[in-house]
Amino acid sequence: MRLQLLAIGQRMPEWVATGFAEYAGRMPRDIALTLQALPNPARSRAMDTSTLRRVEGQALLAAVPGQALVVALDEGGDVVDTRGMARRLARWQQSGRDVALVIGGAAGLDDAVRERADWVWSLSPLTFPHMLVRVLVAEQLYRAWSLLNNHPYHRA
């Protein structure tokens, strides 16, 4: 199974790339965790926020591979604890499908992305900077895998 994080914004601070790589590198070979940073769309002064979200949403959905399950990251989504995330990861593994986790830009996600999503996930009711979310998602997926496999990183 492949877990692919799709995010708007190619310019990442080094700490984001390092943090993501740290957790992605801990994942087992049968669960590849990758990050695809999509370019920010060209903007003009006349472009309003809803147009920007729509353009970013189109780019995110176009990058979703084949029959992948789509998980939209949005503070209005479902909040789950670590055990809930582990159960969801187990279901994803059993499905045999890849999973595309999508993160919008600073303006948030377009409604079309949330509508296309198989699940809308909230890391917190707080609004996190989208760069930080990349690291948090990788850490939470690793934590869920660790729980499923009784890894020392997270034991009951």
Image: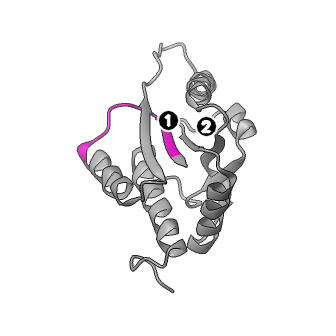
Q: Position of residue 144 (x, y in %)?
A: 52, 67
Given the image, on which type of amino acid does mark 1 rest? Gly
Given the image, on which type of amino acid does mark 2 rest? Leu
Find the residue positioned furthest to the bottom. Answer: 156
Q: Which residues are magenta?
A: 3-14
The residue lying at 45 percent from left, 78 percent from top is 154
Callout 2: helix, strand or loop? loop
Q: Nearer the viewer, residue 114 or 49?
A: 114
Left or right, residue 35 beside residue 50 = left
Residue 130 occupies which quadrant of the picture?
top left
Residue 49 occupies which quadrant of the picture?
top right
Q: Which residue is mark 1?
A: 105
Callout 1: helix, strand or loop? loop
Q: Which residue is mark 2?
A: 109
Find the residue positioned furthest to the right. Answer: 115
Verify CB contact (< 8 Å) between mark 2 and mark 1: no
The residue lying at 55 percent from left, 17 percent from top is 47
Q: Nearer the viewer, residue 29 or 20?
A: 29
Left or right, residue 113 beside residue 142 = right
The chosen color scheme is one colour
The residue lying at 48 percent from left, 79 percent from top is 150
Q: Position of residue 36 (x, y in %)?
A: 43, 35
Please, is residue 63 above or below residue 142 in the view? above
Q: Position of residue 59 (x, y in %)?
A: 56, 24
